Image (cartoon, grey):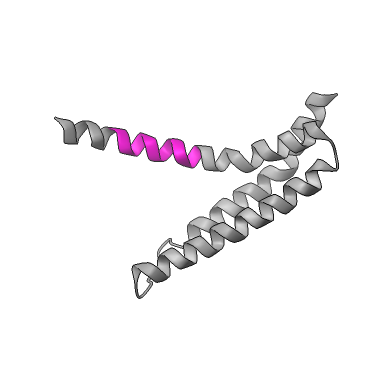
Amino acid sequence: MKEFFFSAGVLAVLPVSLLFQRWLERSVEGVRYPSAVKAYNAFLARALLRMGASLVILVLASARGPAFLLGALAALLLPMLAYFAEAVALLVPSLKRSQS
């Protein structure tokens, strides 16, 4: 039964998490800011709002039990882990080129 609640948590929160990720990416995608500081501030503001909303989601998910909470947490982390893996995949070849 715990597997069901874990899966339900993932399925309930993953669409929200993907929307958060897209919203965060759009803060710097193709937008012309007058300075790098303003671009950074826009990205940081959205990242902080996203963290606050994620905290609210996790508090609400905790009411359904620990399995649902862990599923919701996994769903919130999946897009960030995928983004991190993509960044590493792009970074490693350039590091190898710079060493040779």
The residue located at (50%, 38%) in the rendering is: 82
The residue located at (27%, 33%) in the rendering is: 93
Q: Is residue 50 left or right of residue 37?
A: right
Residue 36 among magenta residues: no
Q: Looking at the rendering, in which quadrant would you find the C terminus?
A: top left
The residue located at (76%, 31%) in the rendering is: 6
Q: Is residue 64 left or right of residue 35?
A: right
In percent of width and height, residue 35 lies at 34, 72
In percent of width and height, residue 75 lies at 66, 39
The residue located at (79%, 44%) in the rendering is: 61
Name the dominant secondary structure of the magenta segment: helix
Q: Is residue 42 left or right of residue 1?
A: left
Bounds of the magenta span?
A: 82-92
Q: Looking at the rendering, in which quadrant would you find the N terminus?
A: top right
**Residue 63 position (above or below residue 31):** above
Q: Residue furthest bottom?
A: 34
In percent of width and height, residue 68 lies at 79, 35
Q: Residue furthest left?
A: 100
